[in-house]
Image: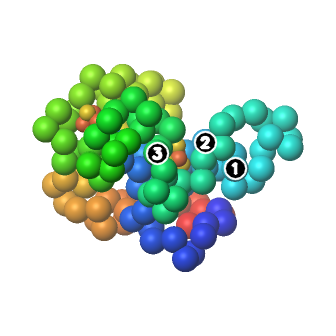
Amino acid sequence: MDTNHTTNREDLIAPCGMDCLLCVAYQSQLHDLKKQGFHRQYCQLCIPRGKNCLHMGDSCELLRDGRVRLCFECTAFPCQRLKLLDKRYRTKYHMSMIENLRSMQENGIEAFISEQVERWKCETWY
Ligand code: SF4
Ligand code: SF4
């Protein structure tokens, strides 16, 4: 996987707990998959651009206004919207944003990133 090495790896963790490197919106734009007939919304990462994540930013005013960096910092965590998103991803992709966030909450973001590298690595990734 080609990643922008000038981007801080922590900036590739979206507020909802998604690792952007695994996100179809990021991978689609990175490889310009619309040219190959794969029509998904493109995302060039939320944190480096100061924009909202497609998953949550428009539906949560705390995230939209940048008052929360990661959802576990929120008193409502895990809110209903996050639970619904989490359920969808657990069912379809066997990964859990809420588990990711709890891991970051307990062990810190650096440890979480190290886990991600181990969990998802293959010869062409990372
Ligand atoms: S939609 Fe964008 S910011 Fe949100 S997880 Fe995907 S790549 Fe990251
Ligand atoms: S947990 Fe809090 S910050 Fe995150 S989406 Fe829900 S309400 Fe917004």
Colour setup of the view: rainbow
Q: Using residue 103 as the reference point, say whether residue 3 is left or right of it.
A: right
Find disc 3 in the rendering and name its residue.
52
Find disc 2 in the rendering and name its residue.
24
**Disc 2 versus disc 1: distance between alpha carbons?**
9 Å
Residue 98 appears in the figure: no
Say which quarter of the image contains residue 37. Answer: top right
In the rendered image, the vertical position of residue 13 relative to residue 71, given as above or below: below
Tell me: is circle 3 under 8 Å from ligand 1: yes
Whole-percent x, y for residue 97 in the image: 35, 40
Which of disc 1 and disc 2 is earlier in sequence?
2
| Image point (41%, 55%), residue name | 13
Mark 3: few/some/many CA within 10 Å (<14, 14-19, 20+): many
| Image point (19%, 48%), residue name | 73
Q: Using residue 52 as the reference point, say whether residue 76 is left or right of it.
A: left
Find disc 1 in the rendering and name its residue.
29
Camera-nearest label, 1 or 3 = 3
Which of disc 3 and disc 1 is earlier in sequence?
1
